[in-house]
Structures are given as C-alpha cells and as structure tokens.
Amino acid sequence: MRYFVVIPAAGSGRRFAAAIPKQYAALGSSTVIEHALAPFEADADCAGIVVSVAADDSWWPSIGARRSRLIESAPGGEQRAHSVHNALRVLAGRARDDDWIMVHDAARPCFTDSDLQLLKRDLAAHPVGGLLAVPLADTLKRALEPGVRSIHVDETVERNGLWRAVTPQVFRLGVLLRALDGALAAQRIPTDEAQAIEWSGQRPQLVAGRPDNIKVTTADDLILAAAILATRQPRESS
C-alpha cells in the first residue's frame, strides 16, 4: 500500500501550558513529533512526508534536518483543516489522485507499527478510506455548564455505537482534497478529515486500534506517553 503522510504541526498547544509547543516537547531522548514520525520513516511503503508548520516555527527546521528521510514542509494554517489542505496541495503536484494519504497528529507519539500494518491491510481495497478509532468503554456524562471542575451532570449519554476517533486517518488524495475544498469553500471547518469526508456524502471505515495511541494535550499526557513508551521494547520511535 503506497502512501504519503501529512502531519499538521502548526498548533500552538495552548492547553499544554509550556513555552514550547507540545509537538516539540522532549520525550525520552527524542521529541513528541519525532516519535510520531518514526513508524512512517521506517516503513518502505511510505512514499513521502509533508509536515505543515507555522510561519514563525523556530523548532522544526533543526528537527527536520536530522531525520533519516527527506521530509518536506508546507505552510500551516489557522485551523487543522487549513494545514492539511496546504500539505495536500504540496503533494498534488507529484502524487496520483488515487494515492493514499495518512494524516497523523504531530502530538500522537504512541502510534505503533502494528496499527500501521492493520490500517494498510484493512483499507487497501477500500474506495474511500477510513480512520483508526477506539470503541468507547466508559459511561459518558453530558454537562451543559461551562468549566471543567465541579460542574453538574445534565444527562448520561448512551455509549453504544460511539467511538473515539484517533489518527492516522487514511483517505485517497483526490477524495480528501475535494472534500476539504468543498468544506472550506462553504466556510465549514471540520474537526478531522473524516468529518470532511462525511460532509461530502461518503462513509469512512472505522478500524479498531490500540487504546494507548494517545494524544499529548496536557503536561500529564506527556508523562503518560513516556510511561507507555517505557513499557515497550526498544523500537523505531526514538
């Protein structure tokens, strides 16, 4: 399954509450984004990688220069959808319309090669594509009040059929580019690539992945990611 990788990495990570964006935070002997990149760099099926970065990003150039494979950059955008769209435009000049694109979060460092192989196996023959996701196991509560502490339950939400969307999200280049073109032209901002595909009238496939493929959003998440990586054998992510 020949594919290209897009990494939107232009976010400032306000909730991370640090002087450095979360994707560049130290994680072991490496950084969060380098862990996120490593499974793709080690895979012979990966035909290229584009990282979308902010115009004032002073961290990426040195990181990109020391990686084992040539990685292109694209201008980041105001929202994730804009960053992904810009990266797809970079790829459109040399990738085919039916080539696969894997969009992966820069701050998701615990993605494994086993999930990568699962995605390739389950989606290779799919006409549109799909995404890694995790079925919800916890009881869900909805709160209508603002804030994150000491708020009241409004209702319990039925969890049957609900999944937590993670990344990579995997779609054919032409399908994804046209879906994002349509969404942005209508001034609709999808929260992930799958939502843009859904808005275009298509149904992505859910592929059940590992629950420890976490996203680093807060400093506590960084501690958890380090613990997850420490339990694994030495691997390609460092």
Image (tube, rainbow, N blue to C red):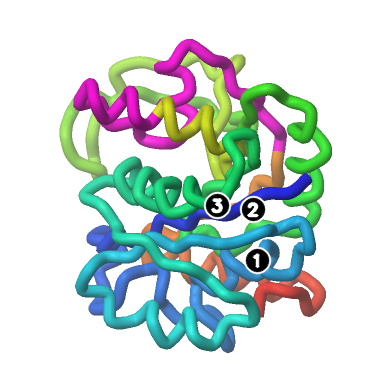
Query: Tag on residue 27?
Result: none
Q: Which residue is drawn at 29% across and 18% down?
A: 154
Q: Residue at x 56, y 21 (%)?
A: 162
Question: Is residue 157 toward the left or the right of residue 77 in the image?
Answer: right
Question: Is residue 26 toward the left or the right of residue 166 in the image?
Answer: left
Q: Position of residue 90 (x, y in %)?
A: 43, 54
Q: Give the range drawn in magenta.
A: 180-208
Q: Position of residue 119 (x, y in %)?
A: 74, 41
Dot placed on the residue nearer the N-terminal end, 2 or 1: 2
Residue 190 falls inside the magenta stretch: yes
The residue tagged 3 is 94
Question: Is residue 57 toward the left or the right of residue 178 in the image?
Answer: left
Residue type at mark 1 is Ile
Residue type at mark 3 is Arg
Q: Which residue is drawn at 49% across and 32% down?
A: 176
Residue 62's image quarter? bottom left
- In this view, the residue in front, 77 or 168, is 77
Q: Crowding at label 1, few (<14), some or many (≥20) Cα neighbours within 10 Å?
A: some
The residue tagged 1 is 228
Inspect this view and state whether residue 133 appears: no
